[in-house]
Image: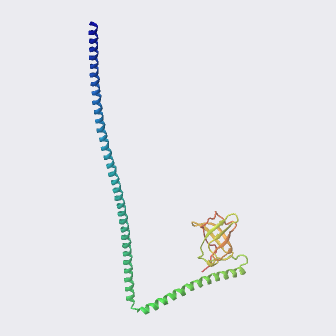
């Protein structure tokens, strides 16, 4: 009997301890479930906040894209307006220049008209006078050309006469107004090429002085004459310095006028 009571007491004690453990575990379970629910609630809140932030970010990106597009459009419009303004300014300057030219032409025309009116000539008389003046100018140009040819001929004949009578003292005389330049130099063979020839009055054996900045450099003698070129050799003992392209040449023995 005593043993049975002891067993019952042990069983009751074990049940009590188990109940206490169950109660304690249940409390822990309830706590964990509460924490879980709280975690889920916080997670949902965070997810909702994240979704809201994503939506705001997307809206901000769209607004930024719109702003960039509007800025690009504004910049393009500004450039177009600037180009239009520059074009209009250039056109205005052109018109102003044309207006100034037109005014000058008008003033010149007024001056010419006043001068024409002052002559008292009729249009037909003015035309005949203009034609006569043009013909006179043409005749004058021809006369100048003939004079140049005759001058070269006279100098050539004078040189020929002097060659026959000079007995060793003869020198070829060239036109006093003859001027030329050195085109090329060959220091090895002591000759130069000049930019003047027969058309300008150069004659074979004519002597020319080569100078630079007013200083005598050398004396050369013509050996070959072409239409508008000639070749001359440096006279021995007369090279006082190096000859360069562009040096000036003038007659050493100019003909008297």
The image shows residue 43 at horizontal and vertical percentages of 31, 36
**Quadrant in the picture for residue 126:** bottom left
Q: Nearer the viewer, residue 188 or 221?
A: 188
User: Relative to 148, is 233 on the left or the right?
Assistant: right
Q: Nearer the viewer, residue 225 or 103?
A: 103
Residue drawn at x 35%, y 56% is 69
The residue at the far top in this view is: 2
Residue drawn at x 39%, y 87% is 116
User: Relative to 59, is 153 on the left or the right?
Assistant: right
Tell how many labels. 0
The image shows residue 128 at horizontal and vertical percentages of 46, 92
| Quarter in which the N terminus is drawn | top left
The image shows residue 55 at horizontal and vertical percentages of 31, 46
| Quarter in which the C terminus is drawn | bottom right
**Quadrant in the picture for residue 74:** bottom left
Q: Nearer the viewer, residue 237 or 8?
A: 8
Residue drawn at x 63%, y 81% is 152
User: Relative to 90, is 254 on the left or the right?
Assistant: right
User: How has the structure been colored for display?
Assistant: rainbow
The image shows residue 71 at horizontal and vertical percentages of 34, 56
Relative to 27, residue 133 above or below: below
**Quadrant in the picture for residue 221:** bottom right
Relative to 52, residue 162 above or below: below
Relative to 87, residue 43 above or below: above
């Amino acid at each position: 009997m005593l043993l049975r009571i002891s067993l019952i007491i042990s069983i009751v004690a074990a049940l009590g301890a188990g109940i206490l453990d169950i109660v304690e575990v249940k409390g822990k379970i309830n706590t964990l479930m509460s924490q879980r629910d709280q975690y889920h609630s916080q997670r949902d809140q965070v997810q909702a906040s994240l979704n809201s932030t994503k939506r705001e970010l997307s809206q901000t990106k769209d607004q930024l894209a719109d702003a960039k597009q509007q800025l690009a459009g504004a910049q393009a419009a500004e450039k177009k307006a600037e180009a239009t303004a520059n074009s209009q300014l250039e056109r205005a300057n052109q018109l102003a220049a044309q207006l100034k030219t037109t005014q000058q032409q008008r003033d010149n025309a007024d001056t010419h008209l006043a001068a024409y009116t002052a002559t008292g000539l009729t249009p037909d008389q003015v035309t005949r006078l203009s034609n006569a003046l043009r013909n006179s100018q043409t005749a004058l140009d021809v006369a100048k050309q003939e004079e140049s040819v005759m001058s070269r001929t006279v100098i050539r004949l004078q040189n020929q006469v002097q060659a026959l009578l000079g007995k060793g003292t003869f020198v070829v005389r060239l036109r006093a107004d003859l001027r030329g330049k050195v085109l090329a130099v060959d220091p090895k063979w002591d000759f130069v090429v000049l930019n003047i020839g027969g058309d300008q009055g150069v004659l074979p054996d004519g002597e020319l002085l080569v100078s630079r900045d007013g200083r005598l450099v050398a004396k050369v003698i013509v050996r070959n004459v072409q239409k508008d070129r000639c070749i001359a050799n440096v006279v021995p003992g007369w090279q006082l310095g190096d000859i360069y392209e562009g040096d000036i040449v003038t007659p050493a023995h100019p003909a008297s006028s």
